[in-house]
Amino acid sequence: MNSFQAFLKRKDIEISLHRYGIDALSAMAQGLFCSLLIGTIIDTFGAQLHIAALMEPVATIAGTQYTVGGLASAMSGPAMAIAIGYALHCPPLVLFSLTAVGFCANALGGAGGPLAVLFVAIFASEIGKAVSKETKIDILVTPLVTIAVGTLLSAWWAPALGSFAMQLGQLIMWATDLQPFWMGILVSVLVGIALTLPISSAAICAAFGLVGLAGGAAVAGCCAQMVGFAVISFKENRWGGLVSQGLGTSMLQMGNIVRNPWIWTAPIITSAITGPVATCVFKMQMNGTPVSSGMGTCGLVGPIGVYTGWAADVASGAKAAITAWDWLGLILICFVLPAVLTPLIHHFVVRAGKVKPGDLKLDA
């Protein structure tokens, strides 16, 4: 036993909640942002600002055309896996081999791709580290073992993890059949939670075509998470944290949530409030692309998606005009209410002693 523990220490393999639930999760969130989310932002701005260089295909792979943003989004699996490997202190040959592992896990995981990448990349990384530099032909053994373990686990685990994520999506779609008030709460809370978890809320919304009133509730929930976390953590993370969470992703807080789940209380309660406000008061609908329903304020894709839906409805005659009431609802639901309600609710959580200074601090 002592020799095994010494081996793990020599290989820097630390089997702990902190290493996997905080370090790996936080790094994966950054990898997701630098690929899928930034790619979607590039595509959205290219379309809205009519920038030809961003709208035109730059590559055709297996008959599929990709824009600049599309290429970035397509690399989300490798980006997340490499980020996880970096957090686990993988040596170069293991780290580079995770490119194939991440692509495989993400592709086989479907809407649950990010969740599949998390589990598979952790195992592939640690096993790759275990064999690294143990033979004289390390340049062959390490990549072969890392990729073999990663692809086999992807084939075994990723579909099941993807199925779990899809079931979450089905639950969201079931909620759309309820009355607007309860639907607003359920969809807003569930999609908002999915946005912050290592599950692709954007992919779930796209897979199930989550638009209309349910899409509006989804936007409300995502904005509550992103703007809410950005505001309540401003003292710890200042302007960089405000931008990275408010315009990036609330998944950056996932490591802190694992450490102290109470920090999630205020954003979740806020989403339960803004969801029905969106569906019952302003009747805000997402009639843009379904993926926008799960993006929130990430690059302002969510609000822009609502606006493009309005514009399309006006052009088709389904909507007479974009009114001041529409704009008021969009601004209140996406920005003002999350920025006001979340810190107010969080104040009581802090007063109750559930959250202490530093709990929302992001890793540099």
Image (cartoon, rainbow, N blue to C red):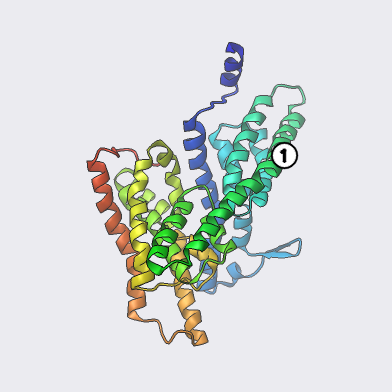
User: In percent of the image, x 74 and y 30: which residue is there?
Assistant: 139
On the image, the x and y values in percent for residue 357 come to 29, 38
Task: Please give the count of numbered marks on the rendered protein.
Answer: 1
The residue at the point 63 percent across, 37 percent down is: 95
Q: Quadrant of the N terminus?
A: top right
**Residue 18, image x and y in percent?**
47, 32
Judge whether residue 84 can be spotted in this image: yes
The type of residue carrying mark 1 is Leu
Instruction: Give the residue at mark 1.
Output: 152
What's the residue at 50%, 60% (across, down)?
A: 172
Q: Is residue 330 visible?
A: no
Identify the image quadrant of residue 61. bottom right
- Left-right relation of 353 to 311: left
Disc 1 is placed on an element classified as helix
- Residue at the left extreme of this rendering: 351
Query: Is 266 or 11 nearer to us in this picture?
Result: 266
| Relative vertical location of residue 27 with respect to residue 250 in this rendering, above or below | above
In which quadrant will I find the C terminus? top left
Q: Decide: is 82 above or below 172.
A: above
Give the image location of residue 251, x and y in percent: 46, 48
Kindly indicate the quadrant of the structure image that contains residue 136: top right
In the displayed structure image, the side of residue 322 where residue 71 appears, left or right: right
How many C-alpha atoms fall within 10 Å of the one at disc 1: few (<14), some, or many (≥20)? Answer: some
**Which x, y percent locates residue 354?**
29, 39
Q: Residue furthest front?
A: 178
